[in-house]
Amino acid sequence: MGHLFNRNVLLGVTGGIAAYKSAELVRQLQERGATVRVIMTRGAMEFITPLTLQALSGNPVHTELLDEEAEQGMGHIELARWADLLLIAPATADLIARLAAGRADDLLTTAALATAAPLMLAPAMNQQMWRDPATEANISTLAARGYHLVGPAAGEQACGDIGPGRMEQPVRIAEAADQLFPSGLLTGKRVVITAGPTREALDPVRYISNHSSGKMGYALARAAAEAGAVTTLVSGPVSLPVPDRVRALPVESATDMLQQCLDLLGDCDIFIACAAVADYRPSAMEQQKIKKGPEEITLQLVRNPDIVAAVASSEQRPFTVGFAAETNDVLNYARDKMQRKNLDMIVANDVADRSIGFNSDQNAVTVLWRNGEQALPRAGKDSIARQIIELIAQLGGKR
Ligand code: C5P
């Protein structure tokens, strides 16, 4: 069984000649343990019948957005929520254009907008259509939004042309879908992740903080839970939903975060410090609101404890992973930080590039460990998180 075991795959089939291969794809997905439901567009039904895909998937095929009966059963929102993956194979040029435009003019495009699940496309079209700048632009738009692409393959086409545009083989598509779910890698491991900013109170209404969104830490928690870990997030104040199967423990200040992490050490195999912890806090919190008065006031700050370093030097030391946001000489500073804080692994990101990292949905990092490193090129934070979790599982999960 692959990582798709127990996963719900919503398979979108659109109107291209490759639609006949979707029947085989249903089989391939099921062989890996997935439950499959199918949405067909009108075009798809010109090439293959719903009955074929219904018989293979063992579930009724969904075809209409505004069908009262269907909406009473599993309507478009339920379908979108049900899916752990929305896989569209074949994906025609027209479907790709409608997704890029954010249209919701049939059941499939509506489900694509309504789902929080990862989306994967297996494009299939004539080679000239694939090379057309409009398709190219649509594909890069979707890739930037985090869509996963598989194929197209190159070769002889149904229309007689030779070139890129053939739908990738069903077995390859199923493998690529499988890879999205590194489930099982951390089964039974207990993972604690710090995320978000901390707030250091000045008085009852004011605090010092930073712009950390918590997105990377939450993506890591999602990936760890998907990999089977018992996952706890120790989170500073953020406005993100808690991922499924993750326990979130809210904290405010660095001191609270440290205490919470130390309390969890007896139940922790892997510790990932992703929080943007304030380096300093006011030396004393005023009990009353500080009144406006003199033109100048001075704040006295004291150093906060280093949470990850404290965890890494504890007796029950878990496999400990830190982050290093640097603007220059990134890898050298990160390696130095890893040694200084006694970490097993450090994830370095270059924050000089404003389009990645802090507050953005994308990231590009290099993961360093004692005797190795691996660059993870720019991708959505969910994808980067899954790759980091995979590396942690390889290096530390087996301890
Ligand atoms: O020293 P610096 O803040 O650059 O180190 C970053 C790493 O250390 C991150 O993993 C961060 O979560 C962690 N850290 C911490 N406690 C602090 C400061 C940083 O756990 N007080």
Image (cartoon, rainbow, N blue to C red):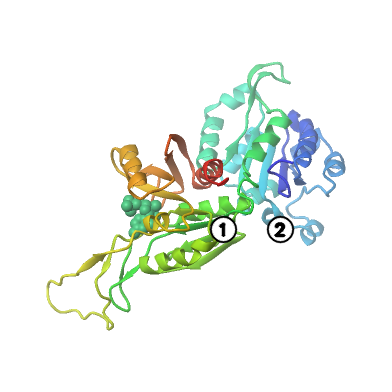
- Asked whether, in this view, residue 303 is left or right of residue 161, the answer is left
Which residue is identified by label 2?
A: 78
Q: Which residue is drawn at 51% across and 58% down?
A: 192
- Asked whether, in this view, residue 225 is left or right of residue 33, the answer is left
Q: Nearer the viewer, residue 377 or 231?
A: 231
Q: Position of residue 45 (x, y in %)?
A: 80, 38
Q: Residues within 10 Å of mark 2 (few under 14, many from 20)?
A: some
Which residue is identified by label 1?
A: 231
Q: Which of 206 and 140 is in front in this view?
A: 206
Q: In this view, does 142 lie above or below 133?
A: below
| SS assignment at label 1 | strand
| SS assignment at label 2 | helix
Q: Position of residue 196 (x, y in %)?
A: 42, 59
Q: Quadrant of ligand 1?
A: bottom left
Q: Residue at x 42, y 68 (%)?
A: 259
Q: Gap between marks 1 and 2, in whole Å?
A: 26 Å
Using the rendered view, name the quadrant where residue 156 is placed. top right
